[in-house]
Image (cartoon, rainbow, N blue to C red):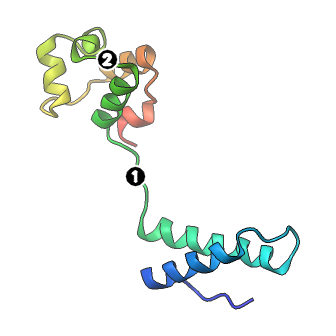
């Protein structure tokens, strides 16, 4: 086993190539152990250099709209008038706590997404 730290994207690509060559290793073999270590190193590098951030509140709302084929008019019970819906979707008005609760209860959008945490 010849494992080295992943310090840059070139090292990352080399790690992926090596991982591909040992990916089907038999459980309990030296290659399988090497694969586990390599996967851990790759995940650590990617989490540090390419973190995945959660979507913002408007992106979460738009995603749910797309999933359920909703129109802005369908959001009026949760946000308010059509003008208010337009302002929220165009980031001209923040979501109020009341809107957040209604969107969560009515469309099952997670609080974390609506609060942007």
Please report the residue visible at 51 percent of the width from the left and 73 percent of the height from the top: 45
Q: Is residue 72 above or below residue 58?
A: above
Q: Is residue 63 above or below residue 12?
A: above
Which dot marks residue 36? none
Q: Earlier in the sequence, mark 1 or mark 2?
A: 1
Residue hosting label 2: 70
Determine which quarter of the picture holds residue 35. bottom right
Determine the secondary structure under disc 2: loop
Quarter of the picture containing the C terminus is top left
User: In terms of depth relative to the viewer, which is nearer, 92 or 49?
Assistant: 49
Residue hosting label 1: 53
Please report the residue visible at 43 percent of the width from the left and 61 percent of the height from the top: 51
Compared across the picture, whether 59 is left or right of 82 comes to right
Determine the secondary structure under disc 1: loop
Q: Visible in this render: residue 22?
A: yes
Q: Nearer the viewer, mark 1 or mark 2?
A: 2
Compared across the picture, whether 54 is left or right of 28 comes to left
Report the Cα–Cα distance between label 1 and label 2.
25 Å
């Amino acid at each position: 086993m010849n494992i080295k730290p992943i310090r840059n994207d070139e090292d990352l690509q080399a790690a992926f190539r090596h991982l591909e060559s040992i990916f089907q290793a038999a459980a309990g073999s030296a290659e399988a152990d090497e694969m586990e270590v390599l996967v851990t190193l790759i995940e650590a590098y990617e989490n540090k250099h390419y973190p995945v951030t959660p979507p913002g509140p408007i992106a979460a709302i738009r995603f749910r709209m797309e999933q359920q084929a909703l129109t802005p008019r369908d959001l009026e019970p949760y946000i308010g008038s059509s003008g208010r819906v337009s302002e929220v979707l165009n980031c001209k008005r923040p979501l109020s706590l009341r809107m957040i609760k209604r969107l969560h209860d009515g469309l099952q959008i997670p609080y974390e997404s609506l609060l942007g945490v």
